[in-house]
Amino acid sequence: MAKTPGERLKIPALCLTQAEAGEENLAQRVLAFSSVVVDSLDMMAAVSVGTLIRDGCGDPDTCHALYCALPRPEFTGMSILLTGKEEAYPPGVVTVDIDSSGMLGHH
């Protein structure tokens, strides 16, 4: 993110929760970047994510990421999910391995 000024990285709250559960202080390090925005789990998101979980679309963090990738009035661009678990998302969802060389600033 430091190499792309003006870009925002939107992190679903449940993904941030899962990351912190897996590694102490990871959320703190991620939130230190000024370009990071956390997508909260508001009422509409909670219902939609719950529906995705019930429908078998994945774990809570995966379903919150799917919800965030859906078209919404406040975001008209194309969502790209950065993930280390590309196989967790259904066909048609644009995913990029977060450890790919392009994501690390190497081309």
Image (spheres, helix red, strand yellow):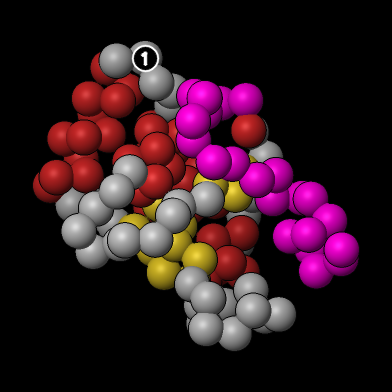
Q: Where is residue 106 in the image (x, y as percent from the top left)?
A: 87, 66
Callout 1 secondary element = loop
Amino acid type of the residue tagged 1 in the rendering: Gly
Q: Where is residue 11 in the image (x, y as percent from the top left)?
A: 45, 57
Q: Position of residue 70 (x, y in %)?
A: 33, 43
Which class describes the residues within 10 Å of circle 1: few (<14), some (14-19), or many (20+)? few
Whether the magenta-drawn stretch holds residue 70 is answered as no
Horizontal side of 103 relative to 36 (left or right) equals right
Q: Which residue is drawn at 24% across and 29% down?
A: 50
Q: Is residue 56 above or below residue 49?
A: above
Residue farthest toward the right in the current orientation of the protein: 107
Point out the stretch of residues depicted in magenta.
Answer: 87-107
Q: Is residue 23 visible?
A: yes
Q: Residue at x 87, y 63 (%)?
A: 107
Q: In this view, does 75 lie above or below 8?
A: above
Q: Which residue is drawn at 29% across and 57% down?
A: 40
The prevailing secondary structure element of the residues shown in magenta is: loop
Residue farthest toward the left in the current orientation of the protein: 43
Q: Which of 39 and 103 is in front in this view?
A: 103
Whether the magenta-drawn stretch holds residue 89 is answered as yes
Q: Quadrant where the N terminus lies?
A: bottom right
Q: Which of 22 and 90 is in front in this view?
A: 90
Horizontal side of 51 relative to 59 (left or right) equals left
Residue annotated with mark 1: 56
**Occupied quadrant, residue 24:** bottom right
| Total count of labels | 1
Q: Which of 38 and 3 is in front in this view?
A: 3
